[in-house]
Image: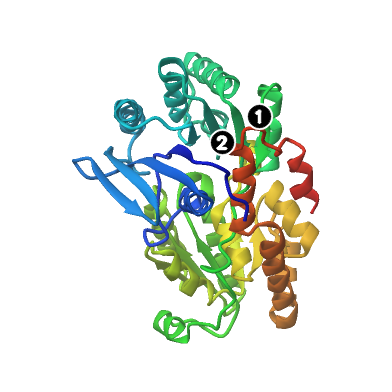
């Protein structure tokens, strides 16, 4: 891995920073840790649900925890309050910290961009802005934001943040293309979510876990991730219902947390699904144990155009674990699955054909294994976390090489 010549200091701002032990999205942990290993001094500004400020050293990263509670179950106004409070406390903290060379700010929420705009104006600090999801486009399309004046303001804010940044980082080709259209004078680097090849790997089935869940010998399909409205996990329950109605002895496992969890539990009960099991949210180690049971991993989003641009962590975990994929939507992930022979598409209106493919593969386990092998190979050659860290190092150098052209490399690799 490349190293940064000379001392460099970065303040990394991510409201939802998490470690592998905590579970969830750990992209910022791996990127920050990789920068530290390359000789960069990294301070992380994040939030926690405690009532007081805290500071910890985590694998060489100096992490500042601001007292800002947040939960997916919060209502709209309570979420907004969390966003505003994190911005305010981050500004106060930045005034006290020693001066970095630059800020690396990741969304969502888009409001973290206010920190960059303020720091550039008040402290003459440059910032790189990483776009994980397209805000405000995503909440507009799903109907969470409807007020025309608010929409107009957020779109102006989005463009201003992009235009004022030193450069931009996108997590998918679709996001990168959007950024380039909106802010054509900014360099846009593509650094997708990535696979941790050491944390996730093909492993023997955890038989004791399978026995404790009462799994049958049929296919096992798992989902590990957020249980929000946009994640469309109810479509996995639709698949479970079809399988049960057709007397398939298949198993469906759902592991995660989110605002839609109660709804999903209620749907399982109302449909009388005896083939579906919920597991509590857990660490990355626990996720890997659940993936060991899987023949296929379910990757889903609600059917809004903006969600086709997503770069979901669970997909890259599944690749590293060497698992075949079932995907419910078109977009970048669908193209990867199709191009590399990673699994089956359960697209709207085409479920009968997809279900027939799944039935056929049930008696062709070697074909499922081949899909899994292809998934692991793609993780190793295109999406290893070391590749992502190397790209980030290029971005933060004074003359970054990563540009919008990188989109072509990963989309067609």
Residue 352 is left or right of residue 194, and the answer is: right
Where residue 172 sits in the image (x, y, percent)?
Answer: 66, 43
| Residue on which disc 1 sits | 179
Task: Tell me if residue 223 comes above or below residue 329 in the rendering.
Answer: below
**Is residue 352 at all visible to an observer of this figure?**
yes
Percent x, y of residue 12: 44, 39
Mark 1 Cα-neighbour bin, 10 Å: few <14, some 14–19, many ≥20: many
Viewer-proximal residue among 110 and 6: 6
Label whose residue precedes the other's in the sequence (1 or 2): 2
> Residue at left 42%, top 49%?
260
Query: Which quarter of the image is occupied by the C terminus?
Result: bottom right
Whether label 1 touches label 2, CB < 8 Å? yes
Residue 169 horizontal/vertical position (percent)? 61, 37
Which residue is at 54% across, 32% downward?
Answer: 129
**Frontmost residue, 99 versus 277:** 99
Answer few, some or many: residues within 10 Å of disc 2's Cα (few below 14, many 20 plus, some between 14 and 19): many
Q: CA distance from mark 1 to mark 2?
A: 9 Å
Residue lying farthest front? 6
Q: Secondary structure at mark 2?
A: strand
In the image, 76: left or right of 142?
left
Quadrant occupied by the N terminus: bottom right
Report the label total.
2
Query: Relative to 190, does residue 256 appear above or below in the rendering?
Result: below
Q: Secondary structure at mark 1?
A: helix
Between residue 389 and residue 397, name the one nearer to us: 397
Coloration mode? rainbow
Q: Residue furthest top?
A: 149
Q: Which mark is residue 119?
A: none
Residue 330 seen: no
Give the residue at mark 2. Answer: 131
Residue at far left of view: 51
Percent of width and height locating residue 97: 32, 32
């Amino acid at each position: 891995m490349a190293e940064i010549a000379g001392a460099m200091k970065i303040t990394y701002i991510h409201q939802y920073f998490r470690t592998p032990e905590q579970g969830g999205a750990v992209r910022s942990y791996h990127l920050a840790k990789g920068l530290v290993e390359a000789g960069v001094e990294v301070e992380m500004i994040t939030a926690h649900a405690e009532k007081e400020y805290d500071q910890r050293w985590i694998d060489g990263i100096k992490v500042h925890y601001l007292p800002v509670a947040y939960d997916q179950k919060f209502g709209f106004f309570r979420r907004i309050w969390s966003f505003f409070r994190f911005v305010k406390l981050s500004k106060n903290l930045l005034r006290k910290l020693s001066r970095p060379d630059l800020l690396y700010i990741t969304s969502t929420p888009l409001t973290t961009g206010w920190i960059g705009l303020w720091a550039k104006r008040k402290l003459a600090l440059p910032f790189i802005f990483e776009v994980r999801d397209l805000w405000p486009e995503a909440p507009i399309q799903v109907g969470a934001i409807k007020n025309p004046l608010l929409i107009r303001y957020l779109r102006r804010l989005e463009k201003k943040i992009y235009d004022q940044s030193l450069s931009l980082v996108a997590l998918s080709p679709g996001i990168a293309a959007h950024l380039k259209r909106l802010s054509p004078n900014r360099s846009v680097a593509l650094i997708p979510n990535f696979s941790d090849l050491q944390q996730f790997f093909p492993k023997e089935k955890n038989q004791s876990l399978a026995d404790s869940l009462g799994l049958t010998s049929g296919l096992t399909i798992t989902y590990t991730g957020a249980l929000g409205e946009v994640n469309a996990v109810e479509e996995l329950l639709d698949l479970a219902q079809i399988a049960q109605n057709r007397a398939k002895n298949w198993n469906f496992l759902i592991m995660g947390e989110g605002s839609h969890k109660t709804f999903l539990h209620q749907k399982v009960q109302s449909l009388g699904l005896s083939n579906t099991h919920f597991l509590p949210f857990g660490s990355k180690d626990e996720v890997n144990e659940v993936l060991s049971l899987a023949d296929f991993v379910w990757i889903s989003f609600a059917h809004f155009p903006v969600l086709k641009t997503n770069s979901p962590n669970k997909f890259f975990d599944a690749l590293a674990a060497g698992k075949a994929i079932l995907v419910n939507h078109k977009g970048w992930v669908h193209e990867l699955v199709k191009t590399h022979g990673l699994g089956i598409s359960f697209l709207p209106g085409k479920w009968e054909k997809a279900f027939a493919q799944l039935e056929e593969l049930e008696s062709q386990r070697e074909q499922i294994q081949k899909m899994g092998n292809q998934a692991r190979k793609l993780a190793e050659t295109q999406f290893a976390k070391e590749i992502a860290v190397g790209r980030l190092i290029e971005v933060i150098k004074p003359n970054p090489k990563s540009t919008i052209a990188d989109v072509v490399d990963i989309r067609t690799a």
